[in-house]
Structures are given as structure tokens and as C-alpha cells.
Amino acid sequence: MRVLLFLATNIAVLLLVSITFRLLGFESYFMQSGYDLDMQALLVWCALFGFGGSLISLALSKKMAKWSTRAQVIDNPTTQGER
């Protein structure tokens, strides 16, 4: 379920970026400015950086949460309080 939500969120962000670029006219602005910009290539770069950044964040989040709260994982509870 987490993977599905991860993919759905990133695809929704890409869709939103695509729609926003088209509504605000970025494509025509870049063409008039002389930039040879391919919107699909830009969205691919957005996807690579977005997916990459979220995967790095996901990988670090558990370790950072443990570190910042000084929490310890109890594998074998030995006292009543740990149980």
C-alpha cells in the first residue's frame, strides 16, 4: 500500500506541474525566449529528482526519527515496563 501511495503522490505532482506549466504558458514563454525546451524532457527530470529525493527522504526518516528522539528499539522486552 505504501508503494502505491508513493507512486500515486509522485504521479499526481507531475500531473499538477504539467497542468500548471500549460495554464501559465511556460511552454510558449520558453519558445519565445529562444530556449529549445521539451516539456516531456522537463517532466522526466522532475520525476527523476522527485522520486530520487523522496526515496532518500524515506530512507533517512526512520534513522533520523530514532536519532532525534533518542529512542531505542526493544527487540526482547525484559521488564514489565518494556512489555
Image (spheres, rainbow, N blue to C red):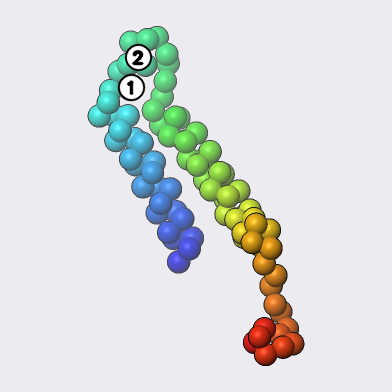
Q: Could you say which is closer to the camera, residue 57 or residue 18? A: 57
Can see residue 75? yes
Q: Nearer the viewer, residue 5 or 39?
A: 5
Answer whether residue 63 is visible to the viewer in this image: no
Secondary element under disc 1, as helix, strand or loop, is: helix
Between residue 69 and residue 35, name the one nearer to us: 69
- Residue named by callout 1: 27
Left-right relation of 71 to 49: right
Q: Residue furthest bottom?
A: 80
* Disc 1 crowd, CA 10 A, few/some/many (<14, 14-19, 20+): some
Residue 66 in the image, given as x and y percentages of width and height: 66, 62
Q: Residues within 10 Å of mark 2 (few under 14, many from 20)?
A: few
Q: Which mark is residue 47?
A: none
Q: Amino acid at mark 1?
A: Glu
Q: Which residue is located at x 33 percent, y 10 percent?
A: 32
Check the image and report above or below for 38 versus 32. Answer: below
How far apart are labels 2 and 1 at the CA level? Answer: 6 Å
Q: Quadrant of the C terminus?
A: bottom right
Quarter of image, res 28: top left
- Number of the label disc, if any, that sits on residue 31: 2
* Number of numbered callouts drawn: 2
Q: Position of residue 31 (x, y in %)?
A: 35, 14
Amino acid type, callout 2: Met
Q: Are marks 2 and 1 in contact (CB under 8 Å)?
A: yes
Q: Nearer the viewer, residue 25 or 41?
A: 25
Q: Is residue 20 left or right of residue 40?
A: left
Asked if residue 68 lies left or right of residue 38, the reply is right
| Residue drawn where x is 44% and y is 54% of the image | 7
Tell me what residue is drawn at x 38 percent, y 44 percent.
Answer: 13
